[in-house]
Image (cartoon, rainbow, N blue to C red):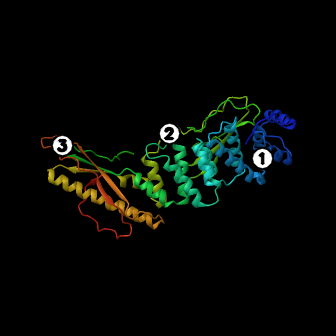
Amino acid sequence: MIARRSLLGFAVISIATARAQTTPPAVPPERVRALLSSENVNERAWGAYYAGAMEMSAEAPLIARLLHESLEARRQHSVQRDLSYFIEILADAAIRLRCPLPAKSLLALANYWRNYLTLILIQFMPTAQEKEHVLLTLLDSRPKGREGDTVAWTAIGNYLLALRSSRWAVRLLREVDIAHRFQVVDGSHRLFGSRLIGGTSDWAWGAWPKDFPPRVLNYLTFDPNVGGVLIAPGPRNVYAVRQESSPDQPPPPSPGLSGEFGAWQKPRIEYLAALTATKVSELERLFQQKTEVDWQDVAALEESIARETALQIDAIREFARRLTRSGITGLEGLQLQVLIEIEDARQSREVPLPAVPPPHKFTLSPSSPAPRPISNPGRRW
C-alpha cells in the first residue's frame, strides 16, 4: 500500500531547491534510494524523479516494479491520493533510464490513456516478438476509421515497418481501399490528364501536487524543430519531446500535436511501398485506378470493365508476390475486393449505362505463377 505522510526534512529542502533550478541538484545516491523505499508516495516520486535525472540505471528494475504495482493498483480502482501523478513520474523515469518494461506494463499504461508514454517506452523492449505483440495490440484497439491521432498511429506503423512485421503487412493490404473508376465518354467529350480516386494529446493533467517533483510532459510529434529525439523513423519520422515545468505553473503547451486525426489511404500505401522498395505513386495507381472507355454499347462497356478489372487484380497479385519475395508471409488465400465505379461523362445519354456491378472479390495466391498479359488494355489515367 502506498501511503502519504509528512515529508522528511531533506525532502523539503530538495523540493525547494529543485523548484528553483532547471536541472535537479546532485543528490547522494543513497538518499535517492531512501526516497524510493519510503512509504510516502510523494517521497517515492522524488526518488524516481532523481533516479531518472541522475541516470541511476541500477534503479531501473525498481522503477519498473513500482510502475507495475502502481498500474495494478489503479486497475483495481484504487482511490489512493496522487497515484496518477506518481505513475506519470515513474513512466518518465523509465524513459530516462531506458528501462525495458514487460508487455503487460506497457499495455496497462496505454489503457491508462498514456499511449504516448507507451510508444516512447516500447523502443526499449528486449525482443522483437514482444514489441510486435504490443504494437499489434495497440492497433487492434484502433480499428480503421477510428485510429485516433495520426502521430500515434504513425509511430506504431514506423516501429512495425522496422520489424518488417508480416501480420501488420497483411493488415495494411486488407485495409487499403481498392477501386476502379470507369469514365464513359463519347466522341464529343474527352477528359485529358490523370487523377486518382480517394486518396492529440492523450494526457490529462489535473492540479499537480505542490509537494511533488516538477510535472513532465512527454509527447510525440512530426516536427523535427522542437528539440525532440527521433524514436521512430519511417516515411514520416516521429519524434519524442520532453517538457518540464514546476508544480505551481500551468501545464506547458503541446506544440507536438499532429493536428491530424485518422490514418487514411496514403499512409498505408506509403508503408506497403517501403516494404517493397516501390514508388508510392506506382501503388497509388495500382490500388486506385481510373480507365476512360469510349462508349459503344452496354456489352462493350461490360467487356471493358471485366478486362480492366482483371488486369488490376493480376497486378495486385503480382505486388503480393513482391511482398512475399521481400519476406512477408501470410498473404496466401487473403481475400480482397475491387470496388467498381462508373462515371457517365457522355454528352449524349439517350442510352442508359448498365447498373454498377458489385465489388469484385478475389483471392491472393503469391505462390502461383504470374499470369500472361491481357491484350487491348483501356486508357488508364
Residue type highlighted by circle 3: Ser
Residue at image position (15%, 41%) is 349
* Whether residue 221 is visible: no
Single out the mark in the foreground, 3 or 2.
2
Residue at image position (55%, 59%) is 163
Q: Closer to the N terminus: mark 3 or mark 2?
A: 3
In the figure, residue 25 lies in which quadrant?
top right
The residue carrying mark 2 is 260
* Whether residue 360 is visible: yes
Q: Where is residue 8 shown, x and y percent of the image? A: 85, 37
Say whether marks 2 and 1 touch (CB < 8 Å). no
Say whether marks 1 and 3 touch (CB < 8 Å). no
The residue carrying mark 3 is 188
- In the drawing, does residue 330 fall left or right of residue 213? left
- In the drawing, does residue 27 fall left or right of residue 355? right
The residue carrying mark 1 is 51
Numbered label attached to residue 311: none
Q: How many marks?
A: 3
Q: Where is residue 327 shown, x and y percent of the image? A: 48, 66
